Amino acid sequence: MEFEDRCHKVQEPKFDCLLFDLDDTLYPLSSGIAGHVKKNIEDYMVEKLGIDESKIETLGNLLYKNYGTTMAGLRAIGYSFDYDEYHAFVHGRLPYDKIKPDPVLKHILKNLRIRKLIFTNGDKDHAVRALKRLGLEDCFEGIICFETLNPPCPPQGDQEPKIFDIAAHFAGSGTADELPKTPVLCKPNVEAMEEALRIANVNPHKAIFFDDSVRNIEAGKRIGLHTVLVGKSQRVKGADHALESIHNIREALPELWEEAEKAEDVLYADRVAIETSVTA
C-alpha cells in the first residue's frame, strides 16, 4: 500500500508539459533572423502580391498589430496565395548559419524529464531546420506549427480579389472590432491556441509556456497556461516569470528539477526495498 501511495505521488507532478516558442525564444533575437524574416515578408508583398512598396511599412505594421502575423492579416484583408510558396519565400531564403549550436540549452532540455513540445507560428520545414542548427532536433516530442492548425489555402480562381483597405479604415473612424476575420489560425489568437493544445493533448493548467511575445504570453495566461516571457528581465502582465535568456530556466523554475529529483528518490527507495525483500 505504501508503494502504491508513493507511485501515485510520483505520477502527479505540478506540470507535465513544457511548450516552447521557437524564433527569438530558443535562439536569441541577436541572431538577426527576425530582421531577415521581416525583409522577406516585405519583398513577398511587393513581388508576389503587387503591393506598392511605399505602402509596405504601414500596411505590415497594421496587419501584424491586429492579426498576430502579417500572413494572417494579408489573408484577412483579401489576399489569396499558396501557403507553401509563402513560407518557402519567407523562410526558405533565411541565413540559417546565423543560428548557432547551443550545447548548453541541449543539456538543460535533456535533463528535464518532462514532455516538451515546440509551439510556433512558423511552418514545419523552418522549425526543423532551425532546431537542427541549434542541435536540438532530438529534444522535443513534437512540433505544433502552421500546418498543424491550417489546411492549404483554397485556389483563388480567376476573379480579382477585393482588398479591404485597412489603412483607410483606421484613418477614418474604424475600430479593430470591425475588421474582417482571418481564416488563418495562429498565436496570439486564443481559439487557435486552445485548438493547438487540444490537438496535442495538453492540459493548459499543467503546462508551462515559453515565448518572447508579450501578446502571446497574455493569450497563454488567458487560457490557463503557466507563462514565461523570454528575452526580458522584467515581468509583464500575464507573465508568471521573465527570463533574459532561455538558459536561465533552472533559476526561474527550480521546481521542475526538484520534482524530478523527488520522483527519482522515491523510485530508488522502492527499488531498494523490493531488492532487499527479495534477497532476504
Image (cartoon, rainbow, N blue to C red):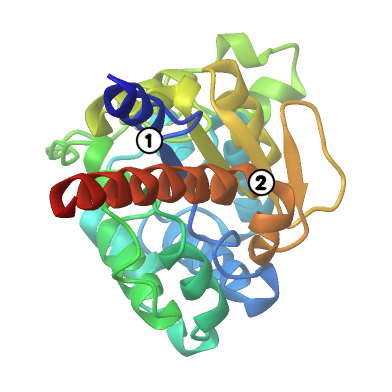
Which residue matches tag 2?
Answer: 253
Residue 95 visible, this angle: yes
* Residue 218 drawn at (x, y percent): 66, 27
Residue at the right extreme?
A: 234
The residue sitting at 49% across, 85% down in the picture is 101
Q: Nearer the viewer, residue 40 or 158?
A: 40
The reply to whether the C-beta atoms of the residues labelled 2 and 1 are less than 8 Å apart is no
Q: CA distance from mark 2 to mark 1?
A: 39 Å
Residue at the front extreme?
A: 280
Which residue matches tag 1?
Answer: 75
Q: Secondary structure at mark 2?
A: loop
Q: Amino acid at mark 2?
A: Leu
> As drawn, is 164 to the left or to the right of 272?
right
For the residue carrying disc 2, how many other residues have a C-alpha within 10 Å: few (<14), some (14-19), or many (20+)?
Answer: few
The residue sitting at 66% across, 48% down in the picture is 254
Q: Is residue 277 above or below residue 45?
A: above
